[in-house]
Image: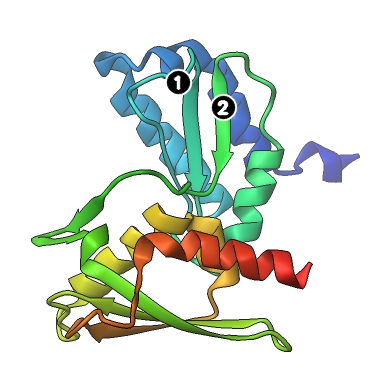
């Protein structure tokens, strides 16, 4: 009996209970409320896993607010994202999304480094027997001594193929400076190549 009395609440349940209790304010995103609520949510999501993050765009989509939970592109965090999203309660005004999704953005920026889709090409090898996909990126003006180039390249890959695919279907990534793109593949073709490989192996 006493064991149940002092049993800690599941941090996932606590997270979603807070979400339900503040659902209307989270949906409306009023400036006077949002700073405190987001701070509270970050504290609560950190109790699930301190590397998980969330985001929500200002614009509504078909009347619903999207709320995305991300693993910060770290594979070992993927199960916690899935557990958290699967535990989400049904909410009429919200769409809860696991992982950052691919989108149509043409580029991204980290500090002073801007990278666009037309500045990145690739080649690849695929070992079907061991399901190993090695991606060789070729990036315009890439500088291996500047860590921001690696960060912005990962961010661009998330835009092109999405966080989950990046973390589960790409085995290895090599980064190179783009010298010529004659026999290389535009980065926009990467989703189709990955999809074709998946279809061939299923």
What residue is at 68 percent from the left and 66 percent from the top? 198
Q: Which of 195 and 131 is in front in this view?
A: 195
Label 2 element class: strand
Query: In the image, is residue 28 above or below residue 45?
Result: above
Q: Which residue lies furthest to the right in this view?
A: 1
Residue 141, x across and y down, in percent: 12, 77
Tell me if 138 is positioned left or right of 37 in this view: left
Label 1 element class: loop
Q: Residue furthest front?
A: 182
Tell me if 67 is positioned left or right of 137 in this view: right
Can I make out residue 9 in this image?
no
Query: In the image, is residue 72 above or below residue 134?
Result: above
What residue is at 30 percent from the left and 14 percent from the top? 30
In this figure, which residue is indicated by the disc labeled 2?
95
Can I make out residue 197 in this image?
yes
Q: Which of 37 and 173 is in front in this view?
A: 173
Labelled disc at residue 113: none
Residue 36, x across and y down, in percent: 33, 26
Quadrant in the picture for the C terminus: bottom right
In this figure, which residue is indicated by the disc labeled 1?
61
Residue 115, x across and y down, in percent: 19, 61
Tell me if 157 is positioned left or right of 108 in this view: right
């Amino acid at each position: 009996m006493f064991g149940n009395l002092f049993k800690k609440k599941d941090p996932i349940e606590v997270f979603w209970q807070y979400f339900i209790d503040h659902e209307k304010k989270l949906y409306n995103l009023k400036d006077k409320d949002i700073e405190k609520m987001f701070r509270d949510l970050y504290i609560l999501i950190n109790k699930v896993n301190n590397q998980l993050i969330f985001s929500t765009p200002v614009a509504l989509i078909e009347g619903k607010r999207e709320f995305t939970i991300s693993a910060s592109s770290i594979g070992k965090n993927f199960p916690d994202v899935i557990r958290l999203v699967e535990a989400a309660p049904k909410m009429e005004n919200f769409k809860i999304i696991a992982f950052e999704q691919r989108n149509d953005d043409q580029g991204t920026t980290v500090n002073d480094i801007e990278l666009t889709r037309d500045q990145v090409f690739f080649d690849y090898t695929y070992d079907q027997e061991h399901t190993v996909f090695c991606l060789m990126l070729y990036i315009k003006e890439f500088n291996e001594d500047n860590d921001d180039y690696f960060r912005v390249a990962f961010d661009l890959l998330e835009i092109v193929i999405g966080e989950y695919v990046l973390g589960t279907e790409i085995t290895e990534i090599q980064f190179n400076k783009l010298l010529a793109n004659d026999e290389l593949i535009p980065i926009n073709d990467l989703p189709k190549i990955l999809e074709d490989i998946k279809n061939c192996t299923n």
